[in-house]
Amino acid sequence: MMMKRTFLLFALAVLLQSCAMVAGIPVNYPATARFEKTPARVVFVNSFNAADLGVRERKENVLQKASAMTLTAAAELFKSLDGLTVVAVEEGIFNENNNADTASLIRQLSKKHTADYVISLDDFSGAFEQDHVEVTRETDGSKTKTAHYNIRSTTTFKLFNADGKSLHVFAGEAIMPHSSRSVVSGLLAAGPALPSNVNDLKAVSKLAVAQAFKTYFPVKATVQRALFFDGPLKTSNVALMKGDYETAKQELRKLIDNADPKLASHAAYNLAVAYESTGEMTAATDFAAISLKKKDNQLAKDLLERLESSINSITTNW
């Protein structure tokens, strides 16, 4: 009995030494879209007109001002893109020329600023919405109701070339939890007013802008990835989970030509994950393939498939 138990414990230890475990890995993914023509000059223009909504004047003014801030936020975001120069941010040109067709106005703007592209804010919204009503039973048997509210913003941008041709539509939406208040009836409760919460509207609108243009920017996040945890891989795994990619890569390169094909395969797979984490998808693909060549394993197959799909999704749109 003792011998059997000792064997089982030994077998479990061997399994844990050689099998894969899931870990949180900080990653930096590259953008999945880019502008074909670079360097390029870009003009941002606000074609949203809150007067068309038919709302009260105070709310109309708030939405128009918020749309202007949203346009500025988009322009600031694009200033960080390599190869693009934001040459102007214009307000209200469409509203002032209601009888002119869109293509003509875009051509005028492009000529005026010698621009290659025009990005127009076509639609914008900001509003409070009731998320849910919480009902609490008090000690005296009565009930109190608390309404919880979110603030939501949506943005729609259109991309045009210098000839006035519409190339693409970018839509973004963002929601932020906002506030709570006691109510008598959830159905009849009035939410917070936009004019009193302009800064919150500005904040959620910036998130909507980021959502609309997210494919043009790298993404930093923590993802769950399976890693091989063979004994010699411990140092590199600790470095990888801390985001110390260079140390992880350096340690793993020492092992990919190990005499043990299993260890070499596992090291090559983990090295592929390290390169994926820094957005170097081609190198990651190469090491995933090396892992499979050293010793066939399902993790490398799955990673290789995901990496090839990611590389194929990087598109030149305009």
Image: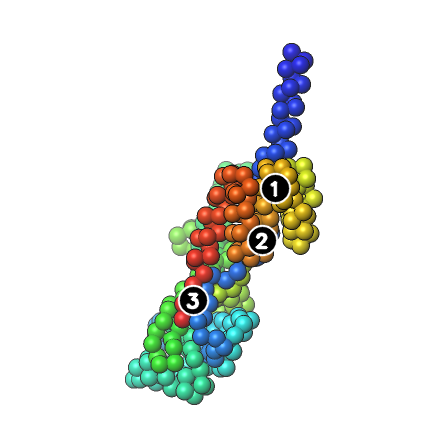
| Relative horizontal placement of residue 278, taking residue 128 as reference (left or right) | right
Which badge, 3 or 1, is on the more N-terminal residue?
Answer: 1
Q: Residues within 10 Å of mark 1 (few under 14, many from 20)?
A: many
Q: Amino acid at mark 3?
A: Thr
Which badge, 2 or 3, is on the more N-terminal residue?
Answer: 2
Q: CA distance from mark 2 to mark 1?
A: 16 Å
- Which residue sits at x=48%, y=65%? 216
> Which residue does the numbered mark 1 point to in the structure image?
264
Say if mark 3 contacts mark 1, CB within 8 Å: no
Q: Nearer the viewer, residue 175 or 164?
A: 164
Please tell me whether mark 1 sits on a helix, a strand or a loop. helix
Q: x%, y% of residue 158?
A: 39, 71
Viewer-nearest of discs 2 and 1: 1
- Which residue sits at x=67%, y=13%? 2
Q: Amino acid at mark 1?
A: Ala
Above or below 98: residue 146? above
Q: x%, y% of residue 156?
A: 40, 68
> Which residue does the numbered mark 3 point to in the structure image?
316
Q: Nearer the viewer, residue 155 or 162?
A: 162
Q: Residues within 10 Å of mark 3 (few under 14, many from 20)?
A: few
Question: Mark on residue 311?
Answer: none
Q: Nearer the viewer, residue 54 or 275?
A: 275
Q: Amino acid at mark 2?
A: Tyr
Question: Mark on residue 275?
Answer: 2
Say if mark 2 contacts mark 1, CB within 8 Å: no
- Which residue sits at x=65%, y=23%? 9
- Which residue sits at x=46%, y=55%? 310
